[in-house]
Image (cartoon, rainbow, N blue to C red):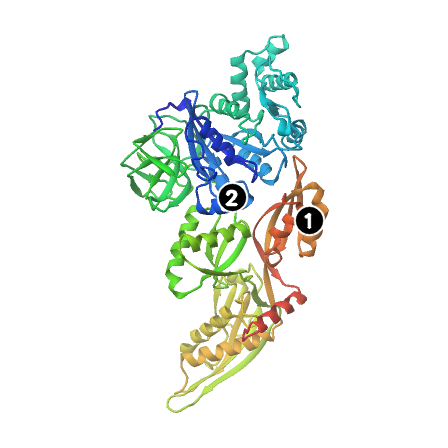
Amino acid sequence: MSGHTLDDIRNVALVGHGASGKTSIADQLLMRSGAIKANTGGNGQPFLDSDDEERARHMSIFSHLAHFEHHGRRINLIDTPGYPDFVGQMVGALRAVETAVIVVNASAGIEPNTRRAFHIAGDEHLARMIVVNKCDQDHTHPDEILTRLREAFGPGCVALNVPCGSGPGLSRVVDVVDPKAQGDDCPIDPKQAHQELIEAIVEADEELMAKYFEGEEPTAEQVASGVTAAMQTGSLIPVMFVSATKGVGIEELMDVLSDLVPSPAVVIHHATDTDGKDVELVPQADGPFIGQVFKTRIDPFVGKLCYIRVYSGRLHKDENVHTVRGGKAFKVHQILDSQGNEQTAADEAVPGDIVAVAKVEDLHVGDTVTNNGSTMSLPPIPFPTPMIGLAVEPKSRADQQKISTALHKIEEEDPTIRVVRDEQTHEMVMQGMSELHLQIVRDRLSKRDHVEVVTHPPKVPYRETVTGESEASYRHKKQSGGAGQFAEVHLRVYALPPDIDPETHFTRDRYAGLRSSHYDKELNFAFLDCVSGGSVPNQFIPAVEKGVREQMEHGALAGYSIRDVAVALFFGKDHPVDSNETAFKTAARQCFKQAFLEASPALLEPVVKAEITIPEAKLGDVTSDLTGRRGHMQGMETLPGGMTVLQATVPLAEMTTYARTLSGMTGGQGSFTMEPSHYELVPPHEQQKIVAAAKSNGHSDA
């Protein structure tokens, strides 16, 4: 597509914390290279922040693809949002590149998403470099920043350039790759920085090290190739100092991106075959086409755009390809080269290219796309699990049909948004990374899709059960002229332990008079026929079970579904004329509710496994807070850079506002993930509150 060979392509993602200046750097790179004109974004707006919501909020929300030429090479550049709320955009972008450029704000230093970006890029086995931006601001100390970077990310953080002057006095940068590097008023000594760079390079190359110890200095070519090789292995994290506002250091950054970062030609990616075996994916233009979708965008004019990184082979316009996931073939009618929001048609894409294809509805983020019957599959993209939920419903009936379509579009564009229908609470729940994340989705539904929604915190999916046993009887009799209704039901209710073996558990020794049992593993529920003497005709016994199940679905204590019970029908009465299925269902519901409430009823609450990453200095505050949330510590792990990971189990009800609390306790440096673990009994005092709340909300059974 680009007219460049594989060796002359570079794929780079700008990542890091919000407000570090990633988009400003991207704009400078594009303008300096001539890819765009100055102020192309209009009204001083960044060229790449082209979404209306981004411009209104003055922040990046989506990743944006652009490209520029320098030294005869094409650099594909992906600018990503910096706030943790939009981390999914960064994760997707990192899958498509060989190099992560981690941008650090010189004034703020290392921030939460700085660390996160660094570690995610490492997990993807990418080359990493750090660009310290805003070096022209007051109270910036490049030497101290370099020290802190080494403390957080290791001694491999080595300067490639050093600033001359600091703060508003910043005038230029000195390239320390040059052995003759020198400059006045440099907070970091250029000669010392050059020496540190040489030592970092030779440590990664045994042959160079041997010559170096013999007194032979590496040549300029050896230094350049050494930087690239050491970046690939991860032993070197080059650090550059720039000011996007002043344009200082931008030309030098362009040189590094074109000349020193690894090309796709030297990076081996991995896939799996149909047997699940690991396969090296060699980037060959004449091999089978293999690519992966890493991003989707709904364009108001073009429609659905799927962004694909090409790893092997060629993709041609009007070619039939298929996804490994579904095997369904589709035709690629258009291949598009993206410069921000602007699209240019292309005839083909080659290994290393990043392109978009339009209007392919069966294509989704993470899909491996291929041709010629290849079944190799690239690893799934490790998007984080959304942590925050909001119940959502349309404000008016007119939007009932539109809301599903609109939410589906949102999910397509953002893999960290998940919309689920909670089978227990019957709510549609929209899950995202933060309150801000979900607020922006609500605004997008309103402004773009013209769907107004009402949101509220989702209900916690409690369950009801019993801890004892009891029996009850209920007679249903209705006579109002014509055919009447009559049924009498006698039931016993038992607590049913989890993980029973239904083949051996249900015996006459345990359940008197047992004739047959129906066991539901999903609900851990058993209906037991213990009727003697035909007191309940056989044709009405299924109606009794139906009535019990209906009441279980609606609950009896606080309106939550019932689990972990065994119900035995042991006696009843019928009427030769007035008994029917409806009468026995009604009697069974009322009898079961009565017996349930007399069998020491209890609530079960969902418990999650939480992993909480925090600064070590905040350990005491966070563990104390978790204890107050009825959490139980399960383990702890120390990470480099003064961070700690806590493992704990915590009731889900205690985590609904945890993101906000954790951010406040840690100054925005804490993050957490959680996943369902198990259910356990709610403490009596908490149960009283929940039941009282159910009564106040009008639950008739509470």
Q: Amino acid at mark 2?
A: His
Residue lying at 37% horizontally and 25% vertically, measured from the top left: 284
Q: Amino acid at mark 1?
A: Val
The residue singled out by tag 2 in the image is 58
Dividing the picture into quarters, in which one does residue 264 lie? top left
| x and y, in percent, of residue 330 in the image | 29, 42
The residue singled out by tag 1 in the image is 622
In the rendered image, the quadrant that contains the N terminus is top left
Locate residue 333 relative to residue 441 in the image: left or right. Answer: left
Dividing the picture into quarters, in which one does residue 111 lie? top right
| x and y, in percent, of residue 522 in the image | 49, 60
User: How crowded is the residue under tag 1: few (<14 C-alpha within 10 Å), some, or many (20+)?
Assistant: many
Residue lying furthest bottom: 481
Locate residue 335 relative to residue 455 in the image: left or right. Answer: left
Is residue 464 visible to us here? Answer: yes
Residue lying at 46% horizontally and 56% vertically, measured from the top left: 420
| x and y, in percent, of residue 188 in the image | 66, 22
Of the numbered discs 1 and 2, the one sitting upstream in the chain is: 2
